[in-house]
Image (cartoon, coloured by chain):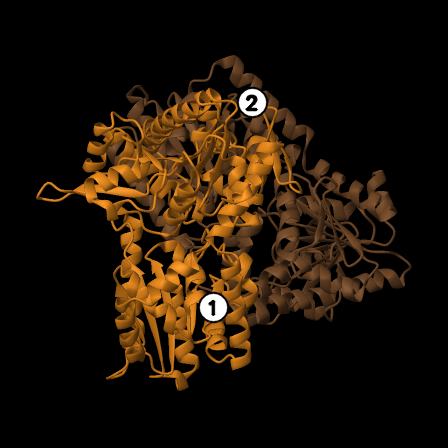
Chain colours: A brown, B orange
């Protein structure tokens, strides 16, 4: 346990996130199984929780079997390791020492409104500025009701549960630190603060925080609830200084609060709330191990077969914010401008279908398929397909592709961080070039090592791709090594420790 | 001549705008005619120019006959009154005492690229944030070329002409004050400053200035040219404090310049540039006179015939920024929620077709016709058409409508000022209620007298319309009188004098 962890370890850490570390399900034979949450974040938080005594994790009960587990414990928290050992055998629960899980059941209708009307797409679209504003959104009673009877209800329910956990910690003589995650729980902190004025509350926002006027898409009852809810925290944390600044500017412009842009604080109700930037990162060791697996090796061999002189790669969800269509248009332009590249370069696009029940996402996937068909028809030859589009989720294949690309394209319109960029530069073995949009969170750290992309400028992206493909060996090496070194020096554990150190300092003050 | 005018009247004022005070044309019989530029701005500037000795006005030669007039004067400036007297008889030129006109001819291709690719729609769409960002714009070589060989060329040409005029003033021992207008000439000031370091340059931006990230739609070569061009000025002027602040935030975030948000200044190249807000206004006397004309009277009688218990009015160009479709959706909702309003309220929409050669505008006009047809089909009866849509330009009819409305709807997504709101509240005779979007420039002045509209919230707009229609007589009177008084006290002449006073003070410093 580090100093920072020790300083806050006087009674417990309470993590709050919509998805928790495990999800339970029941097979046809009646056996319970548990699937670990994917992604570096859950891993990192689990590892943190494991390091601290009495860590608690509050998350939603999302499956019927989750609800059954909740019922078995009368709604109370339970020791995750013990439960997994009991139900899945000893190999089930060996990584969550001391973690108590508190799963929260929510009324189905309220959860549906919370999740499918407000969190996605409304907040997601506002924060990524994806609306075609002359046409959408049309906020109607449906959205007002979903906010009031869905988003607010779920937040209140979680706030009650968190407050109960905080009070348990206090009853045992401790002072809890609550770390809340993401755009599902913007209203939570103020509600917990009301009931537990002395608690330390920290909220991490994992998606972009746009400039104040973007919030004017929402009427005051919604946008003010978001801001005042977050201002219940002691720290509101973001991936970049830009997002933290945007949050402060929003407090100033939309709520008329007194903000100190240099100190990065806002004064509210006699308290001081800090806005801070902690760029999330990856676990290079864990990723490196994965890259040595047999499955990845198999994919890698197949990709070597695909690669000709150059392999351009992108790995994304099919989200409109990822700017996939313009990336292919830029590639089209590259092939037009440089006929010498014909049959020598392949653009491998590994795209996980995302939210296909949302109209904008389904339409966007169709637009991707359309432009790929057009480019392949225009430039393809008997034995060369310029774009290799794979619409599937296959992490091993993505890891293999990270090893072999020559150019990685991340041209997002806007992105909270973009961990693909960090994973790829750490793993790549070809001194591949990172072509990175200026509007990704990752750009604040990796911009100096990357070829910059301006996401709306197709002509510039085509030129940048050419620059990346033809970059001299020395420059490639220097940049790729620099980027990999940066990520190794600023891994996910550094991300967590920076937050804990600030929490310890602020709690002490 | 007021004090402020006197203080800057040491050699001349040079006005610069794309459209000038007159446009010449030639009839089939070979006779030259001159049409005065419409709108309060040209009137106000003409009147200002008339008050100052040696005022000059630089504008584009837009017609063949304009070019003929230029040729007759060998490209030099000429006395506008004299020219009009000579060609049109004495009634032609009685309002422009002492104004010298300098019309600038520009290569047709360069002008077309400048106007139809960059100024409209690119800059207009960026500044009104109208892009459907996952899909548009796609900046290609066409846009880069249009910026370089169109927008920049026209700005350079105008800068040369302005510099010549400034040098003429200097040769006569004066120090010119240049007042540049709008989004056509963002690059001009820096170019003039280079050649004439001591000139006083003032630029008024008549459309919204969005927050810094909105400018990231343009790549650095364009957005930095816009900002550094404007920073050649001594004063950059906007309609609202919000726009001025957004400009300063842009200087800080996009150019890394040292900005003082309290003093509203930015330091650049050893100079200090001020960002200031001067809300443009109208000429209530002139408008009042127009309202007494026979043509307006005739329209007024017709509109009294149309009106039942209530008349809701909107007067707009068919621009996607005006949010016309959502306004009708809100009206639809109002009629659904309040069946008692059936056959008692008519929504008169006076819409001037705008830029129908631009795809987004043509599509938007179709969307307007579609929603009007739907609402009228749904709610209309044998002798009642809920929405009366008139797609035409008819100023007399609009003025008549200002007299008789019960509720004026201005629900723009964003608007630099919105003079319709100011004209309407000054003329209205029914203590009509102004329903005004929070994101119009006018809201900064008239918000306290208005029912606020949140432009993306159809449900809220429906409720606000109901509130406006049913407001008690005392409150209506207080608000409508307050708004009218505000506009009378802050007319276009006050707008000009505030700018001239600041110019005088800054020139003196």
Secondary structure found at label 2: helix
Chain label for disc 2: A
Residue behind mark 2: A480
Residue A8, above or below B345: above
Residue behind mark 1: B434
Residue B31 located left or right of residue A44: left
Do callouts 1 and 2 mark residues in contact (Cβ within 8 Å)?
no
Q: Position of residue A11 (x, y in %)?
A: 86, 54
Query: What's the distance in space between the residues labelled 1 and 2, CA to CA?
Result: 60 Å
Q: Position of residue B10 (x, y in %)?
A: 50, 31
Say which of B492 and A477 sits in front: B492
Would you say residue B474 is visible in this rendering? yes
Quarter of the picture containing the N terminus of chain A is top right
In the rendered image, the residue lying farthest to the right is A173
Q: Position of residue B307 (x, y in %)?
A: 33, 79
Secondary structure found at label 1: strand
Name the residue rendered at 36%, 29% in the picture: B158
Q: What is the crowding at mark 1: few (fewer than 14 residues within 10 Å), some, or many (at least 20)?
A: many
Say which of B81 and B17 sits in front: B81
Say which of B233 and A326 sits in front: B233
Do the residues marked 1 and 2 share a common chain?
no
Chain label for disc 1: B
Give the number of the mark in front: 1 or 2.
1
Circle number at residue A351: none
Name the residue rendered at 37%, 47% in the picture: B42
In the rendered image, the residue lying farthest to the bottom is B340
Would you say residue B280 is visible in this rendering? no
């Amino acid at each position: 346990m580090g100093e920072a962890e020790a300083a806050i370890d006087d009674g417990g850490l309470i993590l709050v996130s919509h998805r928790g570390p495990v999800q339970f399900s029941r097979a046809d034979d009646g056996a319970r199984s548990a699937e670990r949450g994917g992604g570096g974040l859950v891993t990192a938080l689990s590892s943190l929780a494991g390091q601290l005594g009495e860590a608690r994790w509050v998350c939603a009960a999302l499956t019927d079997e989750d609800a059954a587990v909740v019922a078995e414990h009368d709604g109370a928290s339970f020791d995750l390791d013990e439960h997994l050992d009991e139900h899945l055998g000893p190999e089930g629960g060996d990584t969550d020492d001391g973690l108590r899980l508190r799963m929260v059941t929510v009324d189905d209708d309220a959860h549906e409104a919370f999740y499918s009307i407000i969190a996605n797409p409304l907040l997601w679209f506002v924060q990524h500025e994806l609306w075609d504003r002359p046409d959408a959104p049309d906020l109607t009673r449906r959205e007002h009701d979903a906010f009031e009877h869905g988003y607010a209800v779920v937040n209140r329910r979680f706030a009650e549960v968190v407050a109960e956990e905080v009070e348990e910690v206090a009853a045992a003589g401790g002072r809890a630190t609550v770390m809340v995650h993401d755009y599902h729980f913007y209203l939570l902190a103020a509600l917990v603060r009301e009931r537990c004025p002395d608690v330390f509350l920290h909220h991490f926002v994992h998606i972009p925080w746009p400039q104040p006027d973007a919030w004017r898409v929402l009427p005051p009852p919604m946008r003010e609830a978001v801001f005042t809810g977050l201002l219940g925290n002691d720290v509101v944390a973001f991936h970049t200084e830009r997002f933290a600044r945007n949050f402060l500017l929003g407090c100033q412009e939309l709520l008329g609060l007194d903000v100190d842009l240099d100190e990065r604080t806002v004064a509210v109700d006699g308290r001081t709330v800090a806005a801070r930037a902690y760029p999330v990162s990856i676990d290079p060791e864990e990723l490196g191990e994965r890259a040595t697996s047999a499955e990845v090796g198999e994919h890698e061999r197949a990709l070597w077969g695909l690669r000709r002189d150059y392999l351009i790669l992108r790995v994304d969800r099919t989200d409109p914010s990822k700017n996939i269509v313009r990336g292919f248009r830029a590639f089209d332009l590259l092939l037009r401008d440089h006929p010498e590249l014909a049959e020598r370069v392949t653009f491998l696009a590994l795209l996980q279908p995302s939210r296909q029940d949302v109209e904008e996402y389904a339409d966007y996937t169709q637009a991707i398929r359309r432009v790929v068909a057009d480019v392949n028809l225009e430039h393809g030859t008997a034995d060369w397909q310029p774009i290799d589009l794979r619409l599937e989720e296959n992490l091993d294949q993505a890891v293999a592709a990270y090893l072999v690309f020559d150019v990685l394209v991340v041209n997002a319109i806007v992105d909270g961080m973009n961990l693909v960029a960090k994973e790829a530069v750490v793993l790549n073995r070809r001194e591949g070039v990172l072509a990175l949009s200026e509007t990704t969170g990752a750009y604040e750290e990796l911009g100096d090592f990357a070829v910059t992309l301006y996401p709306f400028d197709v002509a510039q992206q085509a030129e940048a791709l050419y620059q990346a493909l033809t970059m001299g060996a020395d420059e490639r090496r220097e940049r790729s090594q620099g980027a990999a070194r940066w990520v190794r020096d600023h891994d996910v554990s550094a991300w967590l420790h920076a937050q804990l150190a600030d929490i310890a300092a602020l709690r002490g003050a």
